Image (spheres, grey):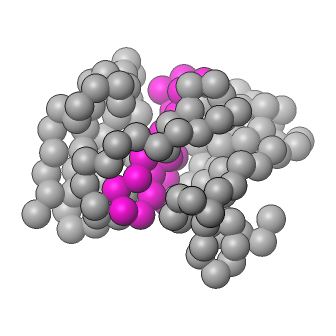
């Protein structure tokens, strides 16, 4: 890939996801996935979404990637397909972490903090934006 990778997560041994921009100039996004410890990587890219900055997974099949303009991409099929959630902010989201259970926290520009206890399936529990 010619893209810039910014974040990686490995929810289980041998399965990892990496995110960044598809081109070195920062346009479009790129998600890479491996199921064999990095032996081979499959890519998913779309110019429809902006740069991706962070990724985290609840388990080996459910992951969240965060991007510019408040975009959160989700997968529930181990990265075979990705879908955008309805944005709850317009600020760039720069990092995400999923804790035990279904709790995830997202941080971003201008002090934005988003949190959910439902694995992203319902409205955000708490929100702090300027």
Outermost residue, top side? 101
Relative side of 86 to 113, left or right: right
Residue occupying the point 40% across, 53% down: 71
Quarter of the figure with residue 5? bottom right
The C terminus: image quadrant: bottom left
48 magenta-colored: no
Q: Position of residue 94 (x, y in %)?
A: 40, 59
Question: Looking at the picture, does residue 70 appear above or below residue 97?
Answer: below
Question: Looking at the picture, does residue 122 appear above or below residue 4?
Answer: above
Residue occupying the point 15% across, 38% down: 126
Q: Position of residue 64 (x, y in %)?
A: 48, 39
- Start and end of the magenta stretch? 53-72
Quarter of the figure with residue 48? bottom right
Nearer the observer, 40 or 92: 92
Question: Looking at the picture, does residue 40 appear above or below residue 19?
Answer: above
Q: Position of residue 101 (x, y in %)?
A: 37, 18
Relative side of 7 to 40, left or right: left
Answer whether residue 95 is visible to the viewer in this image: no
Relative side of 98 to 43, left or right: left
Residue occupying the point 80% across, 65% down: 1
Outermost residue, right side? 39
Q: Where is residue 53 in the image (x, y as percent from the top left)?
A: 49, 59
63 magenta-colored: yes
């Amino acid at each position: 890939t010619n893209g810039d990778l910014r974040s990686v997560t490995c929810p289980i041994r041998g399965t990892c996801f990496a995110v960044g921009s598809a081109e070195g100039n920062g346009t479009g996004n790129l998600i890479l996935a491996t199921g064999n410890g990095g032996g081979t990587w499959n890519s998913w890219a779309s110019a429809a979404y902006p740069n991706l900055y962070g990724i985290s997974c609840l388990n080996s099949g459910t992951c969240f990637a965060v991007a510019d303009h408040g975009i959160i991409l989700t997968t529930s099929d181990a990265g075979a397909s990705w879908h955008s959630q309805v944005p709850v902010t317009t600020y760039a989201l720069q990092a995400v972490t999923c804790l035990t259970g279904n709790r995830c926290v997202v941080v971003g520009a201008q002090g934005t903090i988003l949190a959910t206890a439902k694995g992203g399936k319902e409205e955000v529990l708490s929100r702090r934006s300027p």
